[in-house]
């Protein structure tokens, strides 16, 4: 079996090191993910047995030492899970990363399948006694692994001495983060610039394309006047204060989109959590999510939806780890809005023979709004992710008539469709009665809303198409809409009483 060792041989080596490990314990550790599962193969003399990587011995010793230091198996599993995340980020072998990290905290080496002790035992015991991992050890080891540096316990001890006060309770270098000292609160206006930087980095990471930060005034408008996001439902994480940085930066955020129509059905939308790369791995993202879930429960939600591109692998892995499961998916599509040169035909010009019979006008009164909402509910009813909006919901946002971004379409006096542009964005939507779907009047309505968005200065427009209705995308496709990504709705139900 190459470099692998039988379970019996591994247990013998463990007993030589004074470890209280038997076959039952070995199976328990493998079943709970503390050590890699063995490869089960036939023996030459008959029967079957498990074969382990010899480096597993180092993990067994680490587990026993951490248990002796007061760590529970749950703590140890979380410790190893953190190292697996570090390995995933760097593309390295998870077992090798675990062995390196353990060697940094518990000195000694694996040689020829056995553990070789170290003369630095006192240092190891001291580090364990000081709970170095919980204070700064995890940060130090993670950072060294990410940077490709060799983990050395002497270096860690030296770094520890340089960043901890004589009392041993103050971290003075931000990278060595004690997650318990992070401050979580709501952003003030003074934070709007940093919020713009964080949210731009979040979108860039999700989409794989660099997003420029929005200016503070735009962030202020977004947090104070938007339909679904507010400062009250926006959580930021601040780095611990230090003697060199009395005004610590924002290092992460998490937000809830709370829309009245969705909340009636028990849903809120999750944005984030996002943590800047230098501060990942310390539990900040998990704490942001926990607080967001508490906030969702407080406002009366029964479940949270996170909409993630299939390209956002890290975000998906994080969501799945914390209990989110895929519910449905939709396509995101975009179209370039080309302004015609003088004398050139406009690609968005009306071409339908029924254009003289179709009247498209802004929604200018409550009665027109009610008609638009009724038609939308009739067309979209039963579609995953659709929640009926009421006029009262919109009136709470301070709407005024005429609604400059919302239009009703009448054909021979009959309301047959509605179109709108989400305020402050390039998102466009069109709904028409089923008998007019994929007809020229639908194309006319799409051209109208695209001209409207182009006139506002946008170079492209975007829309979403729920999968169940994806077969009816002929009109948007004919106008140049291309599918750019698949968005998956990941859902988590809140089970709190």
Image (cartoon, rainbow, N blue to C red):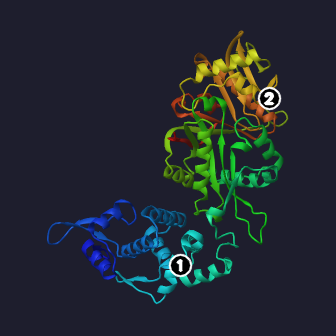
Q: Label 1, on which residue?
A: 127
Label 1 sits on a secondary structure element that is: helix
Residue 28 % position (x, y): 33, 62
Tell me: 232 left or right of 469. Answer: right
Q: Label 2, on which residue?
A: 398
Q: Residue at x 80, y 19 (%)?
A: 364
Looking at the image, which residue sits at the far left? 45
Check the image and report above or below for 472 versus 50.
above
Q: Residue at x 44, y 61 (%)?
A: 74
Question: Closest to the observer: 115 or 309?
Answer: 115
The span from disc 2 to disc 1 (Cα, nearest Å) is 59 Å
Question: Closest to the observer: 284 or 399?
Answer: 284
Residue 246 % position (x, y): 78, 66
Q: In which quarter of the view is residue 224 placed?
A: top right
Check the image and report above or below for 66 versus 331.
below
Looking at the image, which residue sits at the far top? 413
Q: In which quarter of the view is residue 60 placed?
A: bottom left
Label 2 sits on a secondary structure element that is: loop
Looking at the image, which residue sits at the far right? 342
Tell me: 308 left or right of 189. Answer: left
Marks 2, 1: nearer the viewer: 1
Q: Within 10 Å of the Cα at label 1, are there few (<14), some (14-19), or many (20+) other Cα atoms?
A: some
Q: Within 10 Å of the Cα at label 2, are there few (<14), some (14-19), or many (20+) other Cα atoms?
A: few
Tell me: 333 left or right of 409. Answer: left
Residue 25 % position (x, y): 31, 66
Q: Residue at x 76, y 30 (%)?
A: 397
Question: Closest to the observer: 451 or 487?
Answer: 487
Check the image and report above or below for 410 versus 204.
above
Instruction: Name the disc covering residue 266, or none.
Output: none
């Amino acid at each position: 079996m190459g470099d692998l060792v039988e379970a019996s041989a591994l247990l013998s080596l463990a007993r030589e090191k004074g470890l209280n490990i038997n076959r039952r314990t070995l199976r328990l550790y493998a079943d709970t993910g503390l050590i890699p599962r063995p490869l089960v193969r036939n023996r030459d003399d008959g029967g079957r047995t498990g074969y382990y990587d010899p480096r597993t011995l180092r993990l067994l010793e680490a587990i026993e030492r951490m248990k002796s230091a007061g760590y529970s198996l749950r703590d140890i599993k979380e410790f190893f899970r953190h190292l697996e995340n570090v390995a995933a980020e760097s593309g390295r072998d998870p077992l090798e990363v675990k062995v390196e990290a353990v060697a940094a905290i518990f000195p000694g080496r694996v040689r020829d399948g056995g553990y070789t002790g170290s003369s630095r035992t006192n240092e190891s015991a001291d580090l364990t006694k000081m709970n170095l991992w919980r204070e700064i050890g995890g940060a130090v080891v993670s950072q060294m692994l990410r940077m490709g540096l060799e983990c050395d316990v002497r270096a860690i001890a030296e770094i520890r001495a340089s960043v901890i006060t004589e009392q041993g309770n103050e971290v003075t270098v931000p990278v060595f983060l004690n997650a318990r000292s992070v401050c979580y609160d709501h952003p003030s206006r003074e934070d709007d610039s940093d919020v713009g930087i964080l949210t731009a980095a979040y979108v860039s990471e999700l989409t794989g394309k660099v997003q420029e930060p929005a200016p503070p005034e735009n962030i202020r408008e977004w947090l104070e006047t938007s339909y679904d996001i507010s400062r009250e439902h926006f959580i930021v994480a601040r780095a611990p204060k230090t003697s060199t940085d009395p005004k610590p930066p924002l290092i992460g955020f998490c937000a809830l989109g709370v829309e009245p129509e969705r909340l009636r059905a028990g849903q809120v939308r999750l944005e984030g959590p996002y943590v800047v790369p230098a501060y990942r791995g310390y539990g900040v993202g998990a704490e942001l999510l926990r607080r967001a879930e508490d906030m969702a429960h407080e406002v009366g939600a029964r479940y949270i939806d996170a909409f993630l591109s299939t390209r956002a692998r890290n975000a998906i892995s994080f969501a799945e780890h914390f209990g989110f499961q895929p519910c449905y998916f939709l396509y995101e599509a975009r179209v370039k809005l080309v302004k015609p040169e003088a004398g050139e035909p406009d690609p968005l010009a009306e071409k339908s023979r029924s254009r003289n019979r179709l009247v498209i006008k802004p929604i200018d009164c409550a009665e027109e709004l009610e008609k638009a909402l009724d038609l939308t509910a009739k067309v979209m009813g039963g579609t995953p992710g659709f929640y009926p909006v009421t006029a009262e919901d919109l009136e709470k946002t301070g709407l005024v008539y005429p609604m400059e971004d919302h239009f009703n379409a009448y054909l021979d006096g009959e309301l047959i469709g509605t179109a709108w542009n989400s305020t402050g964005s390039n998102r466009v939507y069109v709904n028409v009665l089923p008998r007019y779907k994929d007809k020229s009047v639908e194309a006319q309505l799409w051209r109208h809303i695209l001209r409207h968005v182009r006139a506002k200065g946008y170079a492209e427009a975007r829309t979403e198409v729920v999968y169940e209705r994806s077969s009816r995308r002929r009109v948007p496709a004919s106008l140049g809409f291309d599918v750019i990504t698949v968005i998956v709705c990941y859902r988590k139900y809140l089970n709190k009483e």
